[in-house]
Amino acid sequence: METQLDPMKDDLPLMANTSYMLVKHYILDLDVDFQSKVIEGTIVLFFEPGSRYRKTSSTGKGGCQSQFDETGKMRASESCRVPETNVSTSSSEMEYNDSAVCGKGEEDTSDKNSNHSNEEQASGISGSKDCGDIENHGNKDFLLVLDCCDISVLKVEEVDVAAVSGIEKFTRSAKLTDVSKELKNLRNQIVHELVTLPADRWKEQLYYFTRCSRAPGCGELLFTTGTWSLEIRKSGIQTPTDFPHAIRIWYKTKLEGRSVTWTTDQNGRPCVYTMGSPINNRALFPCQEPPVALSTWQASVRTAAGFVVLTSGENSAEPVQLEEGILSWYYYVTMPMPASTFTIAVGCWQEVKQQSFAAAIQTNTEFALPSSQADFRWHEEICGHVEYPCRFQNPTARLQAVIPYRLFAPWCLMERCEEHLLQLIPQCLSAAYTTLGIHPFSRLDVLIVPSNFSSLGMASPHIIFLSQSVLLGGSHLCGTRLCHEIAHAWFGLAIGARDWTEEWISEGFATFLEDIFWARAQQLSHDEVKGQQELKALLRWRRLRDEVQNSEEELQVLRPKKESTGELSESGASVVKHGLKAEKNFMQVHYLKGYFLLRSLARTVGEASYLASLRKFVQKFHGQLVLSQDFLCMLLEDIPEQKKAGLTVESIFQNWLDTSGIPKPLLEEGETWKECQLVQQVSGEVTKWIQTNQKIRKSGKKKRKQIEVDFQKDRIKVPCDSTNLLWKRVTFEDYYLLPDQLVLLLESLLEEKSLCPRILQLLEKKYRLQEQDAEVRHRWCELVVKHKYVPGYRDVEKFLREDQAMGVYLYGELMLNEDGKQQELARKCFAAAQEQMDASSAKLVAEMLF
């Protein structure tokens, strides 16, 4: 019996028994219906026995046998040398093009094995309890457990892969000479041969995966659904080895499923996208959620003409018309990834076209390779991951500073995207390449998602979601956030955390690297880089200080499972500690403490040596799952003198990862950043504002106008290169402040007990606060709320409506003042946005308001 959990408070269960059966490939064949707000269709899963049942065997000449140890850690039993792949031609005996594996676009859609209506396929099945009440059978049949939540499963069946024409080529291997004549063993052996094909036959592999996915069923399987899982069995089958290795599941999503968000875009057109919620994709399709379940996938998605389907795929899909008014989109991925990284977005997106490719081509050659990359000898490098067509083994990828990219947005935001975002993408990609080397993924789509998106950005393989909030106020917030998400291609995707509780490995690295990337994208001088990064460090230190003062201690620990981190149960199931706590989604402690740890290590080692170590880490661990000690051990091996100074993995765990609060080494460091010139400039401005506030309060009405005029004349001039858009500053006449300086200014003024309305009016006018980026406007809204500045309430309302990615805690501040007008404003804004909010955000705000 499943444990009943509070979906807003408890640990997230990962139910899949990956130690017994491991998904190697998914094929999704789906219809997106905006009228019923349902995604329905089939998913075919191809399995291999898990680590507890896997027989030791070679994957063929030049291959790589990869296993998981008892804690779920991936390891290579021999070196993995991936043959060079020419993506334009097939290296197998036959040629396989995209049309051969693009779902139903090129084949007879009336085939008896294609996706008919769910009513037809589910006939004779009265529901999961009738056909799959496994516990009442009293036998010891093997149970396949998949992660599944809020999905209507209609039917589960075994797939007869042996019925596929031409599949005989996978039964001629010497390995099959002694195989039993029983058809079930033959089917499983066919799947084994297919999933273990060498990397240079990836096109052939995708072709036969597709053919097998359309094979007829050969018997329904019993199943039952619980709150968090789907359990499947075949009567009389007692071991994973004998369990069907290819199964098809017919299902529908439910509207309440938190993996999928149905909403409207900024033009009021319907759209749907995956949220990246704590429950990941288990409400989108039945899958194996634990990180160790690395798999590849193909997805054919059909929807009405006029909609664009974007998803995690190596190809830039072109739609195929199936019938009048219906288009099909096909994507595939050949790099094994956790199922949680799959993303889909369907809407009336418009592509923001480049004026020319000249700028991108110029950028491609503008940046020099890091020295460690320039001296790289490709034929000597060995990968440590399972075999797949790896870009790190592709000489062409080595020279590709800018991968092909596309930008999509609702049409009403296309002008903003063209003005700010489009020019930044190649510059940020080049800066990332300069820092870390080869891009792990071959292409990139960037999508501006609807206003209810609950964060500023999210990265998935081949696609990045960005909030509309990054588009206002110049290029600073847009550029830094884009750099952050690009960094996830290496840390979070190409290199994943083996235990999701160690999310600092993804977010800490991305936060640290966004500063490096952004400085290089702007082509700043050494002094400018140092000034910007010290200012940013001070802002993050203040944010961390506030967060640890206002959150539960247990949520501040980066390794909450400590020495148990990475451990799995015998079946492979586990939990994500605090994974269902709604407030954790809005905390930044993992970003900030991870960033400060990496910054501290960089200062200790020296930035050049440190970045060289990061490149070495990427080269060694790409395509794999890691724990904190994997990185720390490698770094300390590179700098053995630091061990003598007392810097050890154990001391880093104790000071940074295993305790709550601000790490001891960081407690006094916040004072050092106050000497930075950019910070000193802000300090001077804060003093003037405070003094003016005092003078206005003490003066009579007759003198106030003169005081304000004198203040307007007192300005600081800071040099500014107006020709460099990436170094553009906030201006008011001849006064300049960087966006981060404005944030620090407003945060400092927030610490004042009282500011008079005239000061707030002057602040808004002087810095044009309504025109600044979301980080600045958020602080302005906090000032408005704290000092009950009624003329600014319209700015608060606009922020809560248009910047939902950042506005959640403003609701709490509106309620804390116990002011009737503010509480009415909070409830009004929530009533307007509630239906569009994701479940976690809506519940958290509701708890604040009612």
Image (cartoon, rainbow, N blue to C red):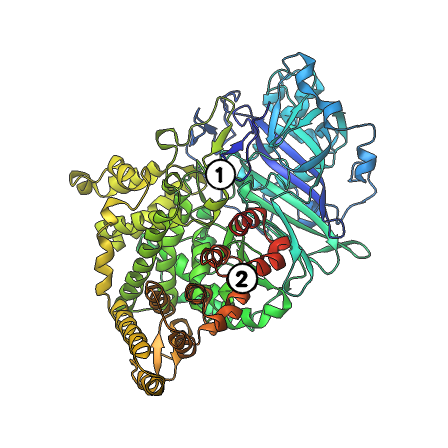
At 75% from the left and 23% from the top, the residue drawn is 130
Residue found farthest to the left: 644
Please indicate whether residue 61 sits to the left or right of residue 246 in the image. left
Other-residue count near label 1 (Cα within 10 Å), few / some / many at <14 / 14–19 / ≥20? many
Find residue 700 and report its horizontal and vertical position in percent: 33, 83
- Image quarter of residue 224: top right
Question: Residue 653 versus residue 732: which sits nearer the camera?
Answer: 732
Please say whether residue 615 is visible from this viewpoint. Answer: no
Find residue 515 and report its horizontal and vertical position in percent: 36, 59
Please indicate whether residue 305 sits to the left or right of residue 545 in the image. right
Hey, what amino acid is under mark 1?
Answer: Gly
Q: Which residue is mark 1?
A: 579
- Tell which circle, 2 or 1, labels the residue nearer the N-terminal end: 1
Q: CA distance from mark 2 to mark 1?
A: 26 Å
User: On screen, 234 above or below 692?
Assistant: above
User: On screen, 838 above or below 128?
Assistant: below
Say what secondary structure mark 1 lies in.
Answer: loop
The count of marks equals 2
Question: Residue 293 versus residue 393: which sits nearer the camera?
Answer: 293
Please identify the quadrant where the N terminus is shown.
top right
Q: Which residue is mark 2?
A: 800
> What number is the disc on residue 830?
none
Find residue 774 and report its horizontal and vertical position in percent: 47, 65
Please indicate whether residue 148 sits to the left or right of residue 781 in the image. right
At 55% from the left and 62% from the top, the residue drawn is 825
Please say whether residue 300 is visible from this viewpoint. Answer: yes
Question: Residue 787 versus residue 215: which sits nearer the camera?
Answer: 787
